[in-house]
Every structure is written in structure tokens, then in C-alpha cells.
Image: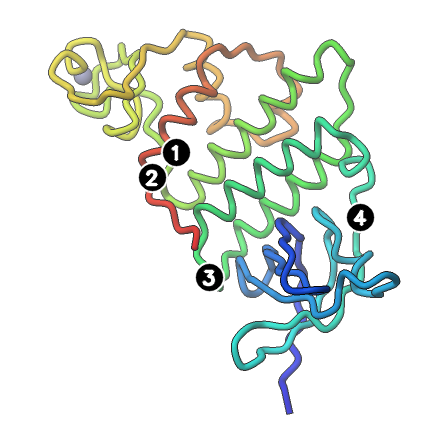
Amino acid sequence: MFIRYRTEAIFLRKSKRFEADEYLIVYTKDFGKLGVTGKSIRKIKSKLRSNSELFCYSDIEFIRGRYYNILTDSEAVESFSGLRSDLAKISVAFKIAHLLDSFLAEEEEDPTLWNFIKKSFYELDKLDFEESQKKKKLQAFYYYFAFKFLEILGYGPEISNCTIDKNEEATIFSPREGGFVCEICSKNLKDPLKAKLKEVDKVFLRKITESGLEEFLSQDLEFELVGEALKNYIAILPSRSS
Ligand SMILES: [Zn+2]
């Protein structure tokens, strides 16, 4: 007899396996990141299929097969239709999924992270911006998610004072030093990815650590080089993807 495990999950990635199977990466409440195989899930009318769409939040059941976990049931809790019907939001969800898959090891339960991810999907689903603001706000949303996620994992960068001598005038972001450094320290620093950020970027990053998501998004914050800094910072972190 197989033990049936039940948990809550958000579907993050999927890839085809064999004729009709699918390999799915989910983030779960009780097992953290988990890989499960949906047997025959790609057959038309598969009951599992519609409740296992990308970015669905479902109650799932799985068994541990000899070589891999097998998805045996999935019931949608929230299908996030506001997210899944919006291409710009979907692209943010893909970036989030990529980030989670890259940095999380399988089967490490983390209640704080589960709550944060779930909340972020609910927020992304209901976000409503004026068309002229949308691109910028969704970018801000993703940066908020990414930096908070890294903070939860213990990789949050130092964004107030210089990481080396605590100088308050720190304007250069150094991925290798793990955050901001001042002009003087920067001169002796061998970090090919270091870059001077604008004051608006520093304010933006500080607001991320200080505010909850709703409060953060309600502010009209500017940013210029945050995306580049994030990309460079992520590049030097240890990736866990298999
Ligand atoms: Zn310094």
C-alpha cells in the first residue's frame, strides 16, 4: 500500500514526459518545492489536468513511487483567472516560477515562504493598474517579490550603509560584497558587476525591506537600475536547480 500525501500546492513549471505524462514542479505548504509526475495527464479529458494548470493553487494528493512522486489528485482552490488571463501578469508569474525553481532545493518545508508565495499570487491576480502604469507597476511587483524572496532565504543584500566600513554614503551596489559600498571602498574592490545606483533605486530598495506588499505598491516609487542590480546579484548566488 502506498501512503497518500495531501498538501496545498501552487503549480510552477511543467514539462512533457513520454507520450502523455507531465513532470510538474510545485511549491507546497508541507513539502516546499516538489517534483511530481502526472501520469497520462495530457490525455484529453484528464480530470487532473484542468486542476493542475500552471499557476493554479490546488489541494493535491501524491504517492511516492519507486523512482518519483506521482500526482494522484488535484482540486483547484483558486485558479487565479485574473492572473492567467493577462499576458503581462503571466510573464511575471513565469519569472517568479523560474526564481523559485532556481534557488530552492526540493522538499524543504518553509511556512514563511509558503505564505509569502501564496499571498504574492493572490496579489498578482487582483492587481489592477491604469494601462499607462501597468508595465512599471508589474516590474516593481517582481522586484519586490525577488528581493523579499532572497531576504526570506537569508540572502537579502545590505542596502543601508557600506558593507565594508559602515559609511552612510554608500551608492555603489556590489553583488560580491552583498550590497552597497561607498565610493572609497569601491576603489579597491574587485567586483566586475559593481555599479553605481541612483538615489531613487536606493529608496526603492529600502522601501522593499520596510513595507508590506500592498503598502509598497500603493507608493509611486521610481527606479532605474534596480533590474540590472538584481540580475547581477542573482548571478553570483548559489543556484540549486537540478
Ligand atoms: Zn565604505
Q: Considering only order in the chain, which callout, 2 or 4, is on the residue closer to the N terminus?
A: 4
Residue that badge 4 annotates: 79
Label 2, label 1: how many angstroms apart (C-alpha)?
Answer: 5 Å
The residue carrying mark 3 has its beta carbon less than 8 Å from ligand 1? no
Q: Is 28 above or below relative to 205?
A: below
Which residue lies at the image location 57% right of the left edge and 12% below the top edge? 221
Label 4, label 2: how many angstroms apart (C-alpha)?
Answer: 32 Å
Q: Secondary structure at mark 3?
A: loop
Q: Considering only order in the chain, which callout, 3 or 4, is on the residue closer to the N terminus?
A: 4
Amino acid carrying mark 1 in the image: Ile
Residue that badge 3 annotates: 108
Residue that badge 2 annotates: 237
Q: Considering only order in the chain, which callout, 4 or 1, is on the residue closer to the N terminus?
A: 4
Task: Give residue 39's quadrant in the image.
Answer: bottom right
Number of residues whose C-alpha sits closer than 10 Å to that of mark 3, classed few (under 14), some (14–19) or many (20 or more):
some
Q: Is 37 above or below relative to 212?
A: below
